[in-house]
Image (cartoon, rainbow, N blue to C red):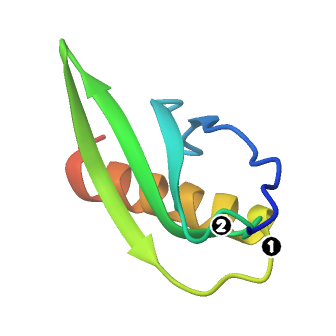
């Protein structure tokens, strides 16, 4: 039986350019894996929750996965916001 590990929760993030609010969520691999296998950046627009982007990769840590989610959110804002 695989050992279960504590997994950290989704992360709230305000993008660097405009302070738009995102949630960085994760898909996990095996029950014993403490590092997510996929990052999903979510953005609430009016009453809808949009997937701003996803990325799959073999990260070395949870913190690296969080940083990838922040990059996804920042790129989403760069693409869709006009100053």
Mark 2–mark 1 distance (CA, rounded to whole Å): 7 Å
Kindly identify the residue that appears in the image at 18 percent across and 12 percent down: 47
In this view, the residue in front, 17 or 8, is 8
Tell whether 59 sits left or right of 37. right
Tell whether 70 sits left or right of 21. right
x and y percentages locating residue 35 in the rendered image: 72, 69
**Quick one: quadrant of the N terminus?**
bottom right
**Quick one: quadrant of the C terminus?**
top left
* Number of marks present in the image shown: 2
Specify the label residue 65 is tagged with: 2
**Relative to 19, is 25 above or below?**
below
Other residues around mark 1 within 10 Å, as few (<14) / some (14–19) / many (≥20) = few
Quarter location, residue 43: top left
x and y percentages locating residue 59 in the rendered image: 68, 82
x and y percentages locating residue 48 in the rendered image: 17, 22
In this view, the residue in front, 46 or 19, is 46
Residue located beneath label 1 in the image: 61
Quarter location, residue 16: top right
x and y percentages locating residue 7 in the rendered image: 75, 48
Secondary element at tag 1: loop
Kindly identify the residue that appears in the image at 47 percent across and 55 percent down: 74
Q: Cβ–Cβ below 8 Å for labels 2 and 1?
A: yes
Find the residue positioned furthest to the top.
47
Kindly identify the residue that appears in the image at 25 percent across and 58 percent down: 79
Tell whether 50 sits left or right of 37. left
Secondary element at tag 2: helix
Other residues around mark 2 within 10 Å, as few (<14) / some (14–19) / many (≥20) = many
Specify the label residue 24 is tagged with: none
In this view, the residue in front, 44 or 5, is 5
Find the residue positioned furthest to the front.
1
Kindly identify the residue that appears in the image at 73 percent across and 71 percent down: 64
Tell whether 61 sits left or right of 40. right
């Amino acid at each position: 039986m695989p050992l279960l590990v504590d997994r950290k929760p989704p992360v709230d993030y305000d993008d660097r350019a405009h302070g738009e609010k995102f949630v960085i969520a994760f898909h996990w691999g095996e029950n014993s894996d403490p590092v997510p296998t996929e990052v999903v950046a979510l953005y609430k627009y009016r009453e809808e929750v949009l997937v701003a982007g996803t990325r799959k990769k073999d990260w070395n840590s949870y913190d690296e996965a969080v940083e990838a989610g922040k990059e996804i959110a920042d790129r989403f804002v760069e693409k869709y916001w006009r100053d």
